[in-house]
Amino acid sequence: MAEEILKARATQKHLRRSPRKVRLVVDSVRGDRVDKALKKLEFTNKGAADEVAKVVKSAAANIRDKFQDARLDNQEIYISEIFVNEGATLKRIQPRAMGRANQIRKRTSHITVVVANNKELVNQ
């Protein structure tokens, strides 16, 4: 193992999108290089693509800032882990007929991205 393992992470919490919808976007970029993932997210026709791209850019900036002497660019950085967890659910009510009420659940997401400089660290 001649090469040093460099890792960094970024998180986005309380994103006002359903985790199920965000996971569709996240699954498409898992294991890719950062430059390829950002290009793919740019042309993805989903609302969550912009938010996922922000977190990937932040993780890439974190690894560059953390290991400045390594001089990494987006072609050398891989997304080793990316996942979406469920955040807090906002509960609202919708009035219905005859004095009843239905509950509306507005779900939130937590996006976590871990990037590394080594292709072997990528979990697919």
Image (tube, rainbow, N blue to C red):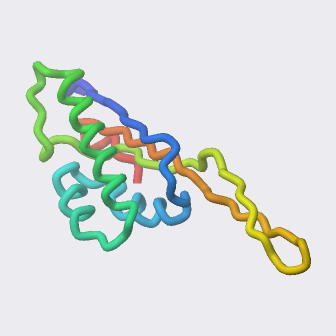
User: Residue furthest toward the bottom?
Assistant: 97
Count the numbered circles shown: 0
Q: Nearer the viewer, residue 66 or 18?
A: 18
Q: Nearer the viewer, residue 47 or 19?
A: 47
Instruction: In the rendered view, tell whether residue 57 sits above or below residue 104.
Output: above
Q: Residue 25: x percent and y percent?
A: 40, 63
Task: Give the position of the N terminus as an image quadrant.
Answer: top left
Q: Residue 78: x percent and y percent?
A: 25, 45
Q: Which of 45 and 4 is in front in this view?
A: 45
The residue that appears at 18% across and 61% down in the rendered structure is 39
Instruction: In the rendered view, tell whether residue 4 sits above or below residue 92.
Output: above
Q: Residue 1, can we see it? A: yes
To which quarter of the image does residue 70 belong?
A: top left
The residue that appears at 29% across and 70% down in the rendered structure is 44
User: Residue furthest toward the right?
Assistant: 98
- Is 50 on the left or on the right of 86, as rendered? left
The residue that appears at 27% across and 27% down in the rendered structure is 5
Task: Give the position of the C terminus as an image quadrant.
Answer: bottom left
The residue that appears at 22% across and 56% down in the rendered structure is 38
- Is 51 on the left or on the right of 98, as rendered? left
To which quarter of the image does residue 65 belong?
A: top left
Q: Residue 2, can we see it? A: no
